[in-house]
Amino acid sequence: MVQPKTLILSAVLAIGLTGLTGIALAEDQHGSVPERQSWSFGGPFGTFDQAQLQRGFKVYREVCSNCHGLSKVAFRNLAEEGGPGFTEAQVKALAAEYKVKDGPNDQGEMFERAGRASDRFPSPFPNPEAARASLGAIPPDMSLLAKARSYPRGTPLFLADPILQYQEHGVDYIYALLNGYSKKDDPNWNDYFPGNKIGMPNPLADGQVDYTDGTPATVKQYAKDVSAFLMWTAEPKLEERKKTGFRVIAFLILLAGLTYLTKRKIWANVAH
């Protein structure tokens, strides 16, 4: 008869081997597995770093926006609570720098006008076909990129993620991807992209974007900042969601306590 300890040990070994196999398959099919990064917005009480979001927006605007749109984000979102913290005046001035297609006018024609705070970021291309003709591929919109991208974690890790409240798979992947251009003779080789050949050449270089707050102007810092910014564009209400969740949990704990005390009060004089 097989002893219970032997069964438990066998189960643990099986789970471990399955996990290692899962990680190996992930590396084979999806390139190297990204390392988990430390983010200010991670965990149940995490919040966005406004300075980092502003730097990330600067990187997006000066580098990424040449090819990638941000179609689900309005200029006014930059001034909302929990975001980069721009003032309304800054947002209006920023929006006015863009040309937005509007219309039709009284003559039935479309026209261009200066952007308003209520407008969404215009696409760098008039349509997907124009993007394909210019770049050879259609670059993804970046609005929800941090939530749309992920990578396999293997059997043991994905089971532990809900317990550890690890929800930053997408932003970790973006950060790793931007730092994954390891071959100088091949600008399209990326360690973390599936198949290792990505259509986007290395977009970042040291000193490319000027930071005015003294933050190091390096590729790793650019990648960190723009990844955090894309996490905010994908989940702009993250801080509000966490605050609401904390209030709900506190309420449920209080309700459970009151329910227990009420039960004891009602049944105190009842014979058991």
Image (cartoon, rainbow, N blue to C red):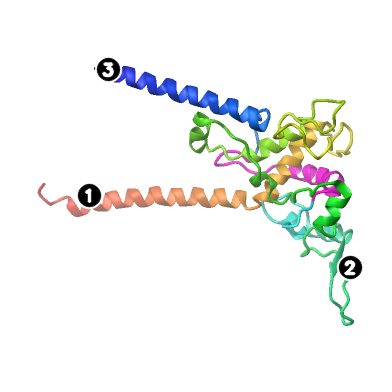
Q: Secondary structure at mark 2?
A: strand
Residue furthest toward the bottom? 106
Q: Is residue 182 above or below residue 159?
A: above
Q: Position of residue 173 (x, y in %)?
A: 68, 36
Single out the mark in the foreground, 1 or 2: 2
Of the numbered discs 3 and 2, the one sitting upstream in the chain is: 3
Residue beneath the point at 58% across and 27% down:
23
Q: Quadrant of residue 198?
A: top right
Please provide the residue range marked out in magenta. 41-68
Of the numbered discs 3 and 1, the one sitting upstream in the chain is: 3
Residue furthest toward the left? 271
Q: Three-letter amino acid code at disc 2?
A: Arg
Residue beneath the point at 78% across and 56% down:
87
Q: Check disc 1 and report the residue beneath it.
A: 264
Asked if residue 10 lies left or right of residue 135, the reply is: left
Of the numbered discs 1 and 2, the one sitting upstream in the chain is: 2
Query: Which is nearer the eye, 269 or 216?
Result: 216
As measured in the structure, the alpha-carbon distance from the residue carrying label 3 to the one carrying label 1 is: 44 Å
Residue beneath the point at 78% across and 48% down:
139
The crowd level at tag 1 (other Cα within 10 Å; few <14, some 14-19, many 20+) is few
As measured in the structure, the alpha-carbon distance from the residue carrying label 1 to the one carrying label 2 is: 69 Å
In the image, residue 250 lies in the stretch drawn in magenta: no
Q: Check disc 3 and report the residue beneath it.
A: 3
Single out the mark in the foreground, 3 or 1: 3
Q: Check disc 2 and report the residue beneath it.
A: 113
Residue beneath the point at 50% across and 31% down:
155
Q: Secondary structure at mark 3?
A: loop
Q: Position of residue 40 (x, y in %)?
A: 65, 38
